[in-house]
Amino acid sequence: MRDDFLAVQAGKKSRHAVMDRVQPSRWQYDYLTLSRLSRDIEALVRQVPDAAPGARALDLGADKSPYRDLLASRGYEVKTLDITRDGGADYAGTVEATGLPDASFDLVLCTQVLEHCMNPWAGVREIHRILAPGGHAIVSAPHVWFFHPHPTDHWRFTQEGMAHLCEEAGLVPLVLLAQGGSVLTLCQVLNFLAYGVLGRAGAPLYAALNVAASIGDRLAPNQLFCHNFACLTRRTESVR
């Protein structure tokens, strides 16, 4: 299955520019996911206290951080880490092994990356290690999503799973946000299926489903069946 996916994707360029992830178009098949995630990541970042002079933020698992402007507006010096530096990342490494010094960042973002880790428990422990005492981390991961090995794809998370993953690493969950409810998740799945057949030609259908999902999610909210979760956590003052 992984080989088939990679064969289909071979030679294709990324479907999105960096800013599409924070300002997606309603004509995109994944507008529902990207718009809700971007909104909630911004909300969580704004719940973190303003950065002290010299504070540093790391976007972990991104070469070109879509949240760079947001983080910089809060006073952070922003750095990025990806598996290589070919795309412009400041550091090369993995979530499980960043190679960065202990307690070297005041805020760490790890969005839509943990599902790709061989060992997400080790990954969140690594986030704890590179966070300064009292620092914050924001992690997000999918609950309902298609198989996407970039470069691998191993895990999906529930509400309790996300909270437990953070707690086990020594991070205290402060806020857990669900992206979308049952109606929105259903429409997002339908858009996935349609995109597989129609590609970009299906934009009018995606836009219609996106509007229907936004209305339906407000009228019949249900966070038991969400497509994604994002969690704001804090490292305790004492070194573990």
Image (spheres, rainbow, N blue to C red):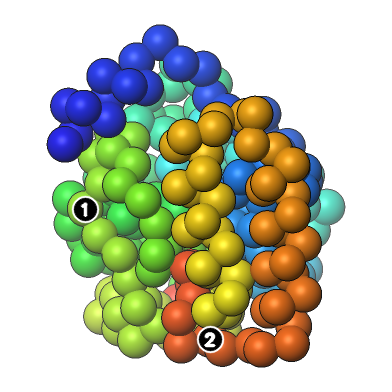
- Is disc 2 surrounded by few (<14), some (14 to 19) or many (20+) residues within 10 Å? some
In primary-sequence order, the first of circles 2 and 1 is: 1
CA gap, disc 2 to disc 1?
A: 23 Å
Front-lying residue, 75 or 89: 89
Which quadrant, please, contains the N terminus? top left
Q: Which mark is residue 21?
A: none
Residue 228: image location, x then y, percent:
48, 68
Q: Answer yes or no: is residue 139 visible.
A: no
The amino acid beneath tag 1 is His
- Is disc 1 surrounded by few (<14), some (14 to 19) or many (20+) residues within 10 Å? some
Q: Secondary structure at mark 1?
A: loop
Q: Answer yes or no: is residue 143 visible.
A: yes
The amino acid beneath tag 2 is Gln
Which quadrant, please, contains the C terminus? bottom left
Q: Is residue 81 above or below residue 122?
A: above
Q: Which residue is mark 1?
A: 154
Q: Which mark is residue 223?
A: 2
Front-lying residue, 43 or 131: 43
Q: Which residue is at 53% across, 24% downward? A: 14
Q: Secondary structure at mark 2?
A: loop
Q: Quadrant of residue 155?
A: bottom left
Q: Is residue 59 above or below residue 44?
A: above
